[in-house]
Amino acid sequence: MIKACIRVLSLLFAVSVISFLLVSASPIDPVQQYINGLGTAVSPQQRAEIEDYWGVNEPPIQRYFSWLGELLHGNLGESAIYRRPVGEIIGERFVNSLALMFCAWVLAGVIGFSLGCVMGMFQDKWADRILKKICYILSSVPTFWLGLMFLLVFSVWLKWFPIGFSSPIGVLDEDVTFGQKLYHLILPAFTLSLMSFANIALHTRQKLVDVLHSEYVLFARARGEGRRTILLRHGLRNILFPALTLQFASFAELFGGSVMAENVFSYPGLGSAVAAAGLNSDVPLLLGVTLFSALFVCVGNMIANLLYGVVDPQVREVVE
Amino acid sequence: MKQKEETLLEIHDLSVSFRMYGQGLEQEELRVISDLHLTVHPGEIVAIAGSSGSGKSLLASAILGILPDNATVRGHLHYKGEELTAERQRQLRGKEIALVPQSVAFLDPLMKVGKQADGHVKPRPVEKRKSLFRRLELPEKTEQFYPFQLSGGMARRVLVSTALLVDAQLVIADEPTPGMSLNQALEALKLFREMADEGRAVILITHDIDLAFAFADRIAVFYAGTTVETAPASDFQKGPDALRHPYSKALWSALPQNGFTPIDGFQPYAGNLPEGCLFAPRCPYKKPECERAVPPVREVRGGEVRCYCSV
């Protein structure tokens, strides 16, 4: 446990160093961005004062450590485009994103796992062949394109779902009902889940195929167990753990996919914030989101590791 | 017909081949069992002895009907005088015909041993299994173990217990003894002996020939996927003159206590079998007809043999 925490911290440290270096090396001028955001003219003298105040002309290592110091005090800086503390923006956006990612994550897991089981049980039969092709197509299609197609078909043509945003237009925030939020969530969540469920389905299929070809399933058959019994007694037991690990390790893809999906559906989550920050050279927000997403993905992987130790008797016994 | 009623299992000219893709898209037929002949009577232990890679384990799968999809089976299997169809195999396996597999790999790695030994039948035969475990010297706590926590010998005893649990009429034991101490192996074989004495039949697939000699009634010598000779176990104790097939004689002479003398050559590869007798390429008594056609099964001095030369 302590080891895992140290690993997370050292990873975050590395991410902070690298992202800081990348930003320093990029042609983005944070002072200019800040001035642009002010909306008033600034004289060269005032500009120099800002630069002095921010420490732009200090050596990079010193700048890095003063940034890190603020970071450790919980100060992520102020966003240049939103004019609000970065921590606050991340917190607020993350709640939206979390709802979206969680729905997509559960959907992808459930659909992917069940489809994988069907494909594995009917290996090389027509059901498997068709589903496998669908999975290959889905995993090669980019999310944003799929999102656009869904918008076109379900929102524009069929008018089943709203075009975008997380709540209806023209309604005050406090008046938005849970149902309305959910309604706005369905299409983006489904799009996002399509990205990873094909992957999960194909992995589950392969794992089940391996299990069904194992010697212990051969013995189960020799003892008179039927296909159904074998799936329930041995199949699920042996494919569930790898599937769970995969599920938690998919946080990275999920986060990456949410950037696309949120932009296509104009969904106000962390993903669209990072895109906005990138496009508008909002350095503090960009760095903040980078660190946060690293933490998010890392926690996912850590859960996957810990979970394996909890549920798999072979790993559990070794640890004990 | 009379004989069929007395036998429990009768195998005639059984061949098993696999379709494999060779180079390119060419399909290759791998014949792993060829023209196999075997009869098993109630109350006896028939040992199937042969070197590894001779198709012994696949014979077990063929009898149980659990060969992979790409396998083709030809020939006749009769169980209790009736044709053993796929449907009948499905009904009988795990109930009347039981398998004792080779190793711990045949146990589900994520299921506790007790639950696994009980099998999928409901209600779980917990009491019976516990008493079997005691009899096989498996400690009480074994049932709480996962397969990876078992020693090789313990795993085999658990596997043996599964066959005893269902009161099978025919038990096919695939290498049941390696990894056990001599005492444990003797105990396991004693159990098989008891089963046979109660009127069941046991097919003991093994390469531990000494143990086979001691416990089996008859020994079928397996070579390149066929039984070249089936003889009473006592013939193997008498020596090569009592045996019928040149391979059986060579096998006898190759045993450590009989001089350790090997013969030249290798067992032929399943994809490249000779036309006639499978042993012909290595046989010192080879005659021209041996290379033309597979010799028929003949009764010679109370044993069955596939050879033109034996008298």
Image (cartoon, rainbow, N blue to C red):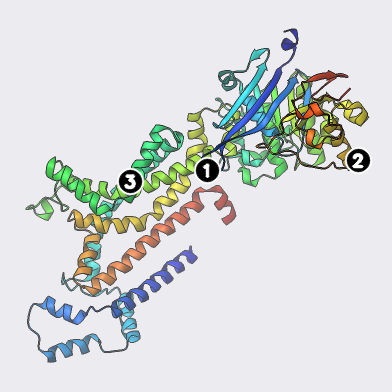
Identified by mark 2, the residue type is Gln
Instruction: Name the residue beneath numbered marker 2.
Output: B257
User: At 35% across and 61% down in the image, what residue appears?
Assistant: A296
| Local secondary structure at mark 3 | helix
Identified by mark 3, the residue type is Ile
Q: Chain of mark 2?
A: B
Residues at marks 2 and 3, CA–CA distance in whole angstroms: 65 Å
Can residue A111 be spotted in the picture? no
Q: In the rendering, at what x and y percent does residue A158 appear?
A: 14, 40
Depth check, mark 2 against mark 1: the one in front is: 1
| Residue A23 position (above or below residue B166) | below
The label on residue B24 is: 1
The label on residue A108 is: none
* Lower position in the chain sequence, tag 2 or tag 1: 1
Q: Is residue B123 left or right of residue A206?
A: right
Q: In the rendering, at what x and y percent does residue A30 appear?
A: 21, 79
Identified by mark 1, the residue type is Gly
Depth check, mark 1 against mark 3: the one in front is: 1
Q: Chain of mark 1?
A: B
The label on residue A137 is: 3
Classify mark 1: residues with Cα within 10 Å, few (<14), some (14-19) or many (20+): few
Of all residues, the one furthest to the bottom in this rendering is A45
| Residue B40 position (above or below residue A127) | above
